[in-house]
Amino acid sequence: MKAIITVLGCDRVGIIADVTAALARNNINILDISQTIMQDIFTMIMLADISGSRKTLAEIEEEMEAVGKNLGVSVTVQHADLFNSMHRI
């Protein structure tokens, strides 16, 4: 099972470290990652394999939102199938 994880907000120290640490704690593997900073705005999108996690997608979403809130950024988690369906023309 795969998920798309997006992170968006003002750049600061520790965003990548805290987000990836939370994923590692939940046995979530990052399959692909893209990250950039545009005029002090941090953006990151990841494709992750969540099949190894003991948590449900909803629990993962909730935890990652809390990580984002602590960092002052927005973190969203979507099932990859939903993401793909929403962006298919």
Image (cartoon, rainbow, N blue to C red):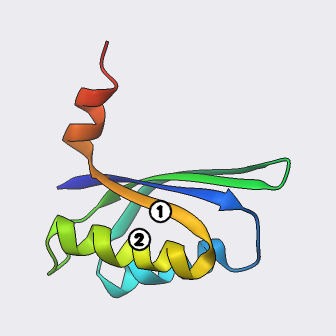
Q: Secondary structure at mark 1?
A: strand
Residue at x 85%, y 47% (from the top left corner): 39
Q: Is residue 2 above or below residue 19?
A: above
Which callout, 1 or 2, points at the residue further toward the start of the chain? 2
- The kind of residue tagged 1 is Val
Q: The N terminus is located in which quarter? A: bottom left
The C terminus - image quarter: top left
Tags 1 and 2 touching, CB below 8 Å: yes
Residue type of the residue flagged with mark 2:
Glu
Q: Is residue 38 left or right of residue 9?
A: right
Res. 25 image quadrant? bottom left
Q: Position of residue 18 (x, y in %)?
A: 56, 81
Which residue is the extreme one toward the right? 39
Residue 65 marker: 2
Report x, y in % for residue 73. Answer: 59, 66
Residue 83 location, x and y as percent? 30, 38
Q: Residue at x 16, y 78 (%)?
A: 55
Q: Residue at x 27, y 72 (%)?
A: 60
Gap in angstroms between the C-alphas marked 1 and 2:
5 Å
Which is nearer the eye, 51 or 12? 12
User: Measuring 55% from the left and 82% from the top, which residue is drawn there?
Assistant: 70
Label 2, secondary structure: give it: helix
Query: In this rendering, would 24 be left or right of 11?
Result: left
| Residue underneath mark 1 | 75
